[in-house]
Each structure stands twice: as C-alpha cells, then as structure tokens.
Amino acid sequence: MISQLIQLVISGLALGAIYALIALGFVVIYRASEVFNFAQGELLSTGAFLMVALCGAGVPWVLALIGSMVLTGALAAGIERAVMRPLIGRPIFVSAILTIFVGFFLRAMVIIVWGVEPRGMPTPWETTAVVELGEARVLWNSIGSVLAGLLTLGAFFALIRYTKLGVAMRAASADQEASLAHGIPVGRILGTTWFLAGTFAALGGVFLGMFPSSVDANIGLIALRAFPAVILGGLESAGGAVLAALILGVLEVLAQAYLNPVLGDFGHNFHGVFPYLVMILVLIVRPYGLFGHQEVKRA
Amino acid sequence: MPTRPLLTRYEDDLKLFPDRWNKIGIAIAIPILLAYPFVASSQWLTVGNLAWVTVVGSIGMMMLTGFSGQISLGHAAFLALGAYTTAILGEQLGLPFWMGIPVSGFVAAAVGLAIGPFALRLEGLYLAIVTLGLLFLVNHTLHSLPELTHGSIGISVPMHTWFPADGSPDPMGTFAKPLVLGGLTVSFEQKLYFFFLAIAIVATYLGVNVQRSNTGRSMMAVRDHDVAAAVMGVHPARAKVISFGMSAFFAGVAGAMFACQQQYVTIEPPFDLNMSVQYIAIIVLGGVGTIFGAVWGALVFVALSPLAEKLFDTLKPHVPLLGGLSSAQQATLLFSLIVVGFLIFEPLGLFGMWLRIKRYFMAWPFKY
C-alpha cells in the first residue's frame, strides 16, 4: 500500500517536473512579452526529435542533450525574431493565436522531416532500469527527470536573481518602454527569453520521451495538460507555476490510481481532465491563480 | 477617406442594406447561390454544405470573441453538444431533424449560460484556458455516457421528416431520399444545401441585427473598455452572459447542422481543440468584430481545404518529403501560413481588404 503510494508520488513528481519545465517556458515568455506561447508543445516535440536524431548520428548522450537544447532554443529565438517581433503592441489575443498557428506549422514540419512512427528515446542508463526504495520500485527515468527539472529550475532562478541578464529580464518584463529608455536592449532580452523557453521545452521533451512512453509527433500535446499548471500558479509567477505543476502532476497520477476505478464509466481516462477540474475550482475562488497579480482597473 | 456616405438620420444608421454596394452584391449573389448546387460537382456541393455550417458557427464565435471580446477555446464543445443532441433525440425519440436543430441550439445555449458567470471573474487568457477545460470536460462526459452516445464508436444521425410510426420502413428517416419535382431530381445533398442556406441567411440576419442593436453595442462597449462601459450605464455582466448564451446557441445549431451533413458523428475528431482554433482563425481571417468577416472567413476557410489538396497534388512530384502529410495536415499547413500572413500584414482580415477595394472604387478616378 505504502510502497505503491511512494511509487505513485515519485512518478507523479516526474510528470510534474516535466509539466514544470513546460509551464516555466510559458511563464518566462508571458512575463517578458505578454505572449501566451501555444507553440511550446511543438518546441518540446522538436527538441525530443532532435535528441533522437543526434543520438542516432552517434553524438554522445550529454552532448546530444546540450545540442538539442541549444538548437531548440535557437529555433524559438528565431520564431520570436521572425513572426512575434512585428506584433509587439498588438492585443494579446492576436499574438496568442499566432503562436497556435506557428505550432501547427512546426508540427507539420516535424511530421514532414521525421514521419509519424514512434521512436524510443535513448537514455544514458539502462532504459528500463529501476531503483528500489524500500519496497517501491522507481524507474531511473523518473528520478532523472525530477533531478533534471530541479537542477534547471534552480539554475533559472539563480539566473533571474543574481545575474545582470536576469535583472535586465525582470526590468523588461516590468516595463518594456522604461527599460528601453534605461539602455536595456529589450529586443535581445525577448530573444533570450524565447531561447530559454526553447531549451526548457527541449529538456522536458527528452525526459518525457523516455520509457515508458516514446517519441512521436503527438508528444507535443502534453503541453495541453500543462496549461492548468500555468493558470493555477498565476500567469506571471514562475515559482507558482512550478509549484502548481508539481502538485498537479502528483494529483493526476494519484487520481489515475485511486479515483478512476471508483467513478465507473465516468472514471475512464478521468485523470486527463482532473487537472482542469482542479484549475476551474481554484479559479472560482482565486480568478488570478494562486500567485498571479490582480490587475487594478481604472476607467 | 470615409467608407460610407455621411449619415444624417438615425434611421439611416439602422438600415439593413445601407448603400447600393450591398444591393448590387445581393443581386449578384442570389442567382449564384441558387444555381450552385445544380452546377457544382459532388465534392464542391459537400464543400458548400459545410460552408453554411461553418458560417453559422463562426457567427456564434464572432458574437463571443468578436463583439464582446471574450476569448474562447471551447467553441467546439458547444458544437459537440449540438451535434449529439440532434443525433440522440433522433435515435431515442425519433424527433424530426428540423426540430432537433433548434432544440440543439437551446441545449448548447443552456450550457453557455451556465458557463457565463465564470467568465465574469476571468479575463483574457485565463478564460481561454478555462473554456479549453470546458471542451475537455464536455468531451469526457460524452465519452462516459455510452448508453446515449455509443462512446468512441460514434452515432449515426437519423433524418426523419416527421415522427416515425412504429415499424416504419425507414429507420434512418425519409429526408435522405431524393425528391422528384417535375422533371428535376433534387438529391439529398442538394435538399440539405437549400435548407442550410436558409438557416445561414437567417443566422446572418440575426447576427447583423444583434451587432447594430442595443445588445451588440453594449457587448462592444464591454470589449473596448468594461469599466468605462459600466460607467456609461452598460451592465457588463449581463452583456457577457448574453453573448455566451447567444454564441453557444449558434454553435449548437451549427453542430446539429454538421451532424445532419455528416450523417455519422464521433467525438474526437472532429470536436477537438483544432476545431475551436479553426473558428478563432476564421474570424481572424475574416476580420474580428464584423459579421462580414464571420461569413467570408468561413466561406474562404471551407473552400481552402479542397484547394490545398489540389495544390499539394501538383507540388508533390517536385518537392520531396511532402508526401508524408495527410490531407487534413496539408490543409492545416496551408491555412496556418495564410493566417500568420494575415495577422502580420492585414490585421483587419478579409474585411480590411474589402474596405480597401471599396475605397479605391469610391474615390475613382482619384487615388484617394
């Protein structure tokens, strides 16, 4: 009983860590430019496929991971420069729609280049290796994704808090015009945030594609499951998004194990909508998420 | 440069056909619309039917997103509700399809009105994600009621013209038979075309009326600045809830029409996030905030997918790698390129292009 619970919580945390990477990608872009990047899921699948392709070409695992992160980041920065930059100042609605279609385009490209058949994601350890914690058997892949997620998040918060670049990013997200007037290259900062979001997406894609799942063209749909985390945490709050992602990951896995069987017909695949249900219930009480800013309205 | 003559009386502003451009357009359109089903090939007839379905659906979308500025990713949920209401009522009660269509609209509107209050507290992207959640919840509920919906297998849509008697020889309905009028045989698809055309015209008329009446104006006031609108005496909560209800009604009707056209519906696809996004793209393509945009965006969008197929068929031998795409993916690729282009270069969409053409001819022979 307890060992099953431990097993579930750890695989929930692993899922949550991937959600957190995706959610963080959304939040950095949203904070910097008020754009909700619906193409994040497609960046994730691009990163995963790049990883498979690089490993297939004989590049060592760690170098391949760095390579796919950098390439995906560069792709994201390229998207920002080519299609998002002309839209600065237009309503948020317009840029959000645009990213949806950029996502469609990327997805078509992924299918054109790599086809639709699923592939296995290479891992540096034995693909199905497990570690025994008491009676619980936990996949190395789960532990790897939790660790990678925590390391990246730690590095990101350190970057935001202690470096000059981080200060510039925070300034640009607070007020673009004012920071431009203070000599901060806002355009380059926006490119950097998209680059970061791309690297997070690629990392999430690599760990998401590992056993027990695989890499296929639909892997990007995971981003739809990460939306509740972003909203629940509050769109402007990076820490809130990470926290909400971990909570929702664990809740989703627990709901799958304990709630689905109880609900009969309604329970079939219920865990897929459960995060949305939690999100809607929380939003009734807190319409700006747990840590979002409440906007003050003036006529 | 004005795009229409100066109005001096309030009655002029309320005219349904304000200038001779509309009258010329209508005079050209009527014979084309009536002759279309007899001229078009069966593929293009299907396209025509789908176009009217999409026109009704996108007028609903326009009311919610275009007029009152509420971004919704849950439009497909209302279409799904409409489609399944018609199918289930036809199967369980033998309700005639033409009664099922308005009933579907009211069922969807009831759900829309129930969602409306959520929208009062949420803004922008928060609302978009919540309506996306609504879509997932509706689809999940449809999946989990297999006694009624037959789950993921799908449900066929009977086309009764009247309540069938017990042991009726046509369990699937009598509307599907061709009709012989004198020497002219009108096939099922052609009958459906005229029926849908009538619904689409009524829907457009209603849409235009909402836009130029108190209701629509209060929605637009809320969209442009809700606090200012409230100060001016508009009730923002009421405007938002009404727009949710009306939008859902149109979507439900469109879903029911879609079910009648397809004759067999499943849950996902077609009623998924893609469909919601397509509706948003349609109104962006047409021009946000105008009924003109909803109608023309829908027509162009539906006509694009067979055109995309033709285009890719000619491109395939010359461009490597394109063969891996399904026809739906080809259409999506082409459509996403077009929408991205419109968003960057022509924010007002087709409506903006139309305004420019009209201005050119109104100012002729001068440039401006």
Image (tube, coloured by chain):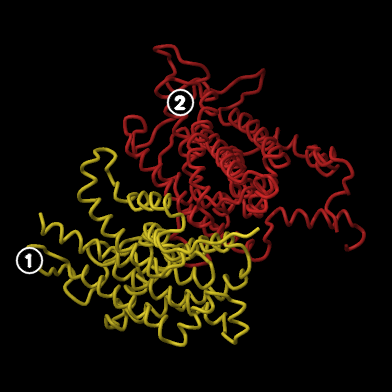
Q: Colour of chain A?
A: yellow
Q: Residues within 10 Å of mark 2 (few under 14, many from 20)?
A: many
**Mark 1 or 2: the one toward you:** 1
Vertical placement of residue B352 versus B15, above or below: below
Q: Name the spot of residue B177 as percent of width and height, x first.
A: 53, 22
Callout 1 secondary element: loop
The amino acid type, in three-letter code, at marker 1 is: Gly
Q: Residues within 10 Å of mark 1 (few under 14, many from 20)?
A: few
**Residue with the mark numbered 2:** B158
What residue is at 61 percent from the left and 82 percent from the top?
A: A180
What residue is at 40 percent from the left and 45 percent from the top?
A: B268
What residue is at 10 percent from the left and 67 percent from the top?
A: A133
The amino acid type, in three-letter code, at marker 2 is: Pro
Image-quadrant location for residue B19:
top right
Residue A134: assigned label: 1
**Chain in red (letter):** B
Callout 2 secondary element: loop
What residue is at 92 percent from the left and 59 percent from the top?
A: B365
Q: Name the spot of residue A137 as percent of width and height, x first.
A: 11, 64
Query: Could you tell me if the residues under marks 1 and 2 are in contact, i.e. CB atoms within 8 Å?
Result: no
Vertical placement of residue B68 versus A79, above or below: above
Image-quadrant location for residue A25:
bottom left
Q: Chain of mark 2?
A: B
* Side of A209 where B130 appears, left or right: right
Q: Name the spot of residue B170 as percent of width and height, x first.
A: 44, 18
